[in-house]
Image (cartoon, helix red, strand yellow):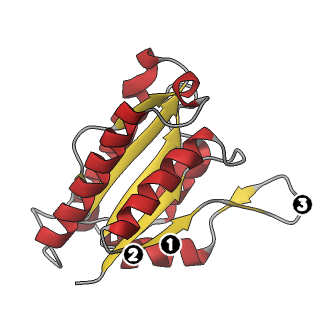
Amino acid sequence: MDLKLVTIYGSPTPPGRLASVLTVAEKYAITKGAQVQRIAPSLDNSGKFFYWEEESLRLIEEANSILIASPVFRGSIPAILKELLDLLPVRSLRSKPVGLFVVGNVAEHYLGVERHITDILSWFGALYVPATCYFTAPSLNDGIPAKNMSQIVQLVDSALILSQSLPDIQLGPPPLAEVHGR
């Protein structure tokens, strides 16, 4: 089975600490035999607005598993990440493992993004990979500490193992969004 992993850089800011975490995860996934594609929001010609390319939606639909990287933004996810999730049809994430990397300024913000993402993933019928990898931004100032490396590896391994164990299986019942034709 070809392992197709899509990583989502869910921030409108230039790549920094969050992107470095995602890069480590991607490099590790490649050593495990995964084909990795990163998607990120694009900036329009005016330089003012971000949007998602149609190609990004296609890549998510074709993926076996997904890793989302999100900053904490006002206790939740950034609007650009929510926009991506709003654009996806239910079939894009249904029964797919989805793992989450989050960077926030303080440890107390760790549940904000996780809570919102898990609600949204439930709507899709996605398989949330248990336990978010949460990093405080200051802890990444000098690179990724060794203790965080093991968390990254565990999240990637979990997402890949789930996708290999459940190929083309629709776990159910179907999400309400599918039942009601959304």
For the C terminus, the image quarter is bottom left
| 3D distance between C-alphas at marks 3 and 1 | 23 Å
Give the image location of residue 152, x and y in percent: 36, 45
- Callout 2: helix, strand or loop? helix
Asked if residue 2 is positioned above or below residue 88 in the image, the reply reads below
Give the image location of residue 79, x and y in percent: 59, 44
Q: Which mark is residue 177?
A: none
Q: Which mark is residue 61?
A: 2
User: If you read the primary sequence from the N terminus, does the residue marked by circle 3 or circle 1 appear first?
Assistant: 3
For the N terminus, the image quarter is bottom left
Q: Which residue is mark 3?
A: 46
| Residue type of the residue flagged with mark 2 | Glu
Asked if residue 158 is positioned above or below residue 160 in the image, the reply reads above
Q: Are marks 3 and 1 in contact (CB under 8 Å)?
A: no
Give the image location of residue 8, x and y in percent: 50, 58
Asked if residue 140 is positioned above or below residue 121 in the image, the reply reads above
| Residue type of the residue flagged with mark 3 | Ser
Determine if residue 126 is in view. Answer: no
- Callout 1: helix, strand or loop? helix
Q: Which residue is mark 1?
A: 57
Determine if residue 134 is in view. Answer: yes
Q: Nearer the viewer, residue 81 or 135?
A: 135
- Toward which corner of the image does residue 66 lie, by quadrant? bottom left
- Toward which corner of the image does residue 137 lie, by quadrant? top right
* Residue in the image at 11% along x and 66% along y: 171
Extreme residue toward the right, this view: 46
